[in-house]
C-alpha cells in the first residue's frame, strides 16, 4: 500500500508531462483528426499512435535516450526526411482541395447549363462530366474518402516515426524525467505517460468521428484539407529551419 501511494503522484506527473508534449497542434494529431472525421480505420490509427508512444516511452525509460543523443547526424538526416514527408502530405491535402473545387465548379456549370444560362464553349465542354463529378463529390462527402488500410497505416507510421521531435520528446526528455525517480518508481512515471497517450488518442479519434456529421459537404472538406495543408507546411518549415 505504501508503494502504491508513493507511486500515484509520480504516475500523475508522468501523465501531465506527456500531456504537455502531445496535446498540441502537430502532424500526428492532425492526421488522427482527419482519419476520425473520415471514419477511415480509426481504431487501427489510434492503436498505432498509442503503441508508438508506449514503445518510445519504454525505450526512454530503459535508458535509450543516451543512444539517441549520441547520433546527432542521424537526427539531422531524419529531420530533413521528416520535413520532406510532411511537405508531401501538404501537397496531397492541397491536391484534394483542388479536385473538390474543380468538381464544384463543374457542378455549377452543369446547373447553369440545365437552367438555360449562357456559358462559354470551354466551360460547356467540361459540363458533360459534371454530373459524374457531382456524384463523386457527394459520395466523397458521404463516405469521407476512406483510404485503403495499408495506405492509412503507412501514412500514420510516416507522421509518427519520421518526426525527430518524437524521439527527442518521448525517449530523451521523458526518459530523462523518468530516470530521476530511480530504478523502480521510474516505471510509474512511464505508466502515467502511456496512460495519457491511451486516453488522448482514444478521445481524439472518438471525438473526431463524432464530427463527421458536420462534414457532409465538399465545402467542409475543402476547409479541413486547407487547414491541414497549411499546418503541414508550417510544421515542415519549422522542422527544416529549427
Image (tube, rainbow, N blue to C red):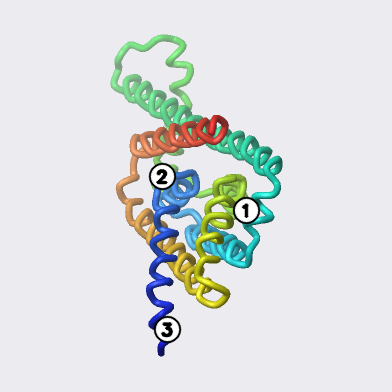
Q: Dot 3: few (<14), some (14–19), or many (≥20) neighbours within 10 Å?
A: few
Q: Secondary structure at mark 2?
A: loop
Residue 55 visible from this viewpoint: yes
Q: Earlier in the sequence, mark 3 or mark 2?
A: 3
Which quadrant, please, contains the N terminus? bottom left
Q: Earlier in the sequence, mark 3 or mark 1?
A: 3
- Residue 232 in the image: state x and y as whole percent: 49, 36
Q: Nearer the viewer, mark 2 or mark 1?
A: 2
Q: Dot 1: few (<14), some (14–19), or many (≥20) neighbours within 10 Å?
A: few
- Residue 51 in the image: state x and y as whole percent: 56, 64
In the picture, the disc for residue 25 is: 2
Q: Is 131 situated above or below 112?
A: below
Which residue is at 38% across, 56% downward?
A: 209
Query: Are the residues tagged 2 and 1 within 8 Å (C-beta)?
Result: no
Q: Secondary structure at mark 3?
A: helix
In the picture, the disc for residue 193 is: none
Which residue is at 46% across, 38% downward?
A: 136
Distance CA(mark 3)–CA(mark 2):
34 Å
**Residue under pointer 1:** 150
Q: Nearer the viewer, mark 3 or mark 1?
A: 3
Amino acid at each position: 500500500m505504501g508503494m502504491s501511494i508513493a507511486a500515484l503522484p509520480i504516475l500523475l506527473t508522468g501523465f501531465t508531462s506527456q500531456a504537455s508534449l502531445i496535446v498540441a497542434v502537430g502532424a500526428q494529431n492532425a492526421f488522427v483528426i482527419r482519419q476520425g472525421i473520415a471514419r477511415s480505420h480509426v481504431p487501427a490509427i489510434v492503436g498505432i499512435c498509442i503503441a508508438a508512444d508506449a514503445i518510445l516511452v519504454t525505450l526512454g525509460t530503459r535508458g535509450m535516450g543516451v543512444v539517441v543523443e549520441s547520433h546527432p547526424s542521424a537526427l539531422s538526416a531524419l529531420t530533413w526526411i521528416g520535413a520532406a514527408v510532411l511537405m508531401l502530405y501538404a501537397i496531397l491535402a492541397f491536391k484534394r482541395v483542388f479536385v473538390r473545387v474543380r468538381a464544384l465548379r463543374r457542378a455549377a456549370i452543369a446547373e447553369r447549363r440545365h437552367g438555360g444560362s449562357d456559358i462559354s464553349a470551354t466551360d460547356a465542354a467540361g459540363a458533360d462530366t459534371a454530373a459524374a463529378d457531382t456524384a463523386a463529390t457527394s459520395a466523397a462527402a458521404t463516405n469521407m474518402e476512406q483510404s485503403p488500410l495499408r495506405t492509412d497505416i503507412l501514412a500514420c507510421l510516416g507522421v509518427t516515426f519520421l518526426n525527430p521531435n518524437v524521439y527527442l520528446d518521448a525517449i530523451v526528455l521523458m526518459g530523462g524525467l523518468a530516470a530521476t525517480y530511480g530504478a523502480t518508481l521510474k516505471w510509474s512515471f512511464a505508466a502515467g505517460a502511456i496512460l495519457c497517450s491511451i486516453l488522448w488518442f482514444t478521445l481524439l479519434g472518438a471525438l473526431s468521428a463524432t464530427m463527421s456529421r458536420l462534414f457532409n459537404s465538399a465545402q467542409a472538406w475543402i476547409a479541413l484539407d486547407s487547414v491541414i495543408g497549411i499546418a503541414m507546411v508550417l510544421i515542415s518549415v519549422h522542422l527544416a529551419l529549427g
